[in-house]
Image: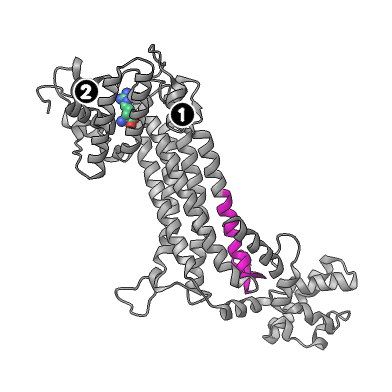
Amino acid sequence: MTKDKNTALWGGRFESAPDDVMQAINASIGVDQRLAAEDIAGSRAHAAMLAATGIISAEDEKAIQQGLDVIADEIARGAFAFSDALEDIHMHIEARLGELIGEAAGRLHTARSRNDQVVTDLRLWVRGAIDGLQEQIRAFQRALVALAEPHAGTIMPGFTHLQSAQPVSFGHHLLAYVQMMERDYGRFGDARARLNECPLGAAALAGTAYPIDREMTAQALGFDRPMANSLDAVSARDFALEFLSAASICAVHLSRLAEEIVLWTSAGFAFVALSDAFSTGSSIMPQKRNPDAAELVRAKSGRIAGDLQALLMVMKGLPLAYSKDMQEDKEPVFDAHDALRLCLAAMTGMIADLQVNTGAMAAAAGANHATATDLADWLVRETGMAFRRAHHLTGQIVRLAEQQGKTLDALSLEDMQRLAPMLDERVFSVLSPAASMASRSSYGGTAPHNVKAQIAKWKDALK
Ligand code: ARG
C-alpha cells in the first residue's frame, strides 16, 4: 500500500511514500536504538569540528549541541518516541533535532553520511562492550583463583577421553580456566587495539570536498587516528567479526567448564554441588536440583558462534563500498554480547559459591588404577628398565588388581613381585594418589607446590 507523500529525510525525489513492507524490511530502529549514546557522541564531535573549521557557524553549533543535550536526556528518561517510519537511529535523532532547533539541525549532516556515521557508532559501541567484557573476565578469573586457593592440594581424577587418567589437583584444574580466560582477555584487547580508528569523515564512500579536520573528530571520540582509506572506512566490518570471534572462543571456553559442572553435579560424580542460588528444581520430581545455568552457558556458546557465522555470511562477497546488507551487522553483535555477558556472570556466580566434595573427588582419584603410570615410572627410575617394558609389566599388575578387585596400593608386594620380581616395598610410596600428584613437579605440572606458586602469581596479577 503506497501512501500519498514521502516524508522521509531522503524523500525529496520521491512522489509517494514507501510500501508498508518496504518500511518494515528497511527499518532498523528496533535494533540500532542501542547506538543512541554513540550516535550523539559522534554528532557532538562532528558538529564541534564543523564549527572549528568554519563549515558551520558557532551559533549553529551551539544550537545543535543544546538540542543534542535535550535528546540525550529524552532517550535516557525513556521519553523519546521511536517509530519505523524514521528507519534508524540516525534519522530519529536528526528529525528530533529539527523539531527542537529548526533550520540549524539541517546543517549537522554536512560533510557526513549515514555510512560513516553508523560505522563510527558501532566501533564506539564495540569498544565499550570490550571494556565491559574484559572487566567481567577479570571478575571470573578472581572467582576461579579464590576457589583454587583452598584446593591446591585437593586430589581429583584428571581425565583423558573422560576416562580417569592421573590424579590432579582441583586447584590446578581451575587454574587451567584462568589461563584460557587470560588469552580471551588478550584477544579482546587485540581486537580493541585494531578497531580503534575513526571512520568519520569518509562520508558516503569517497571522502568530502569540505575542509574537514578528521584528526580532530578522531581525537574527540578517543580513536587513535582517522582511518586512511574512505572506502575501507565505510566498508570494513572485520572489527565486528573479530569481536564475534573473540566472543565465540571465550564462550566455547565457558561451555567446557559448564559441561564439567553438569557432569560433576550429577550423582555419578558428585564432585561439587551448586548453591541454591544457582540451582533450579523440577516441577514434577521434588528431589531434583538441576544445573540449568551451566546447561544454558553450554547452549549459548552455540548461539554466539552462530552470530559469528551470521555476520561472516552477511559480509561474504559484498562489493565495496557500503551495501544495505551491512545494516544486519548489529543484531549478531548485540546478541553475542548480551549472551556472553550473561554467561560470564553466571559462571562467576556458580564458581563463587560452589561446594566441593573433596571426599568424592579423592575416592574417584584412587579408583581405576590412576597411579599405574607412577608404577611404570618407578620401574624406569629405580631399575633402569625401558619405559615400554615397564608399561607392559604395569599393565599385567593392573589386570591382577582388577581380578582381585583391589586398588594398586592394596595389592600385596608378593603378588606384585610374582609379575615383576624387581619391585620392592619402596614402590608403595608412589602408588597413592597424593604421592602421584605431588611427584608431578615439572614446570606447569600439578604438584601442589607448583599450584600454590601459580595461585600466588595470579592473586598478585589480578589485584
Ligand atoms: N541504518 C543503516 C545501517 O545500519 C545506516 C546506513 C544507511 N546508509 C544508506 N546509504 N542507506 O547500515
Vertical comparison of 426 with 116: above or below: below
- Classify residue 37 as left or right of residue 132: left
Is the residue marked by circle 1 packed among few (<14), some (14-19), or many (20+) residues within 10 Å? some
**In the rendered structure, which amino acid carries the disc numbered 1?**
Gln
Mark 2 — residue?
9
On the image, the x and y values in percent for residue 442 come to 76, 62
Say above or below: 376 vs 317.
Answer: below
Q: Is residue 251 left or right of residue 411?
A: left
Give the image location of residue 227, x and y in percent. 48, 24
The secondary structure type at the circle numbered 2 is loop
Q: Which mark is residue 219?
A: 1
Instruction: Name the one closer to the observer, 297 or 129.
Output: 129
SS label for mark 1: helix
Magenta stretch encompasses residue 175: yes
Q: Of 400 and 150, which appears nearest the observer? A: 150
- Residue 236 on the magenta segment: no
Q: Residue at x 33, y 28 (%)?
A: 43
Q: Quadrant of residue 401?
A: bottom right
Marks 2 and 1, Cα distance to the nearest angstrom? 29 Å
Residue 2 locus on image (x, y percent): 12, 25
Disc number placed over residue 459 in the picture, else none: none
**Within the image, what quadrant is residue 375 found in?**
bottom right
Query: Callout 2, which amino acid?
Result: Leu
Decide: is 351 above or below 463.
below
Residue range highlighted in magenta: 154-183
Query: In this image, 397 relative to 460: left or right?
Result: right
Q: Is residue 438 visible?
A: yes
Q: Earlier in the sequence, mark 2 or mark 1?
A: 2
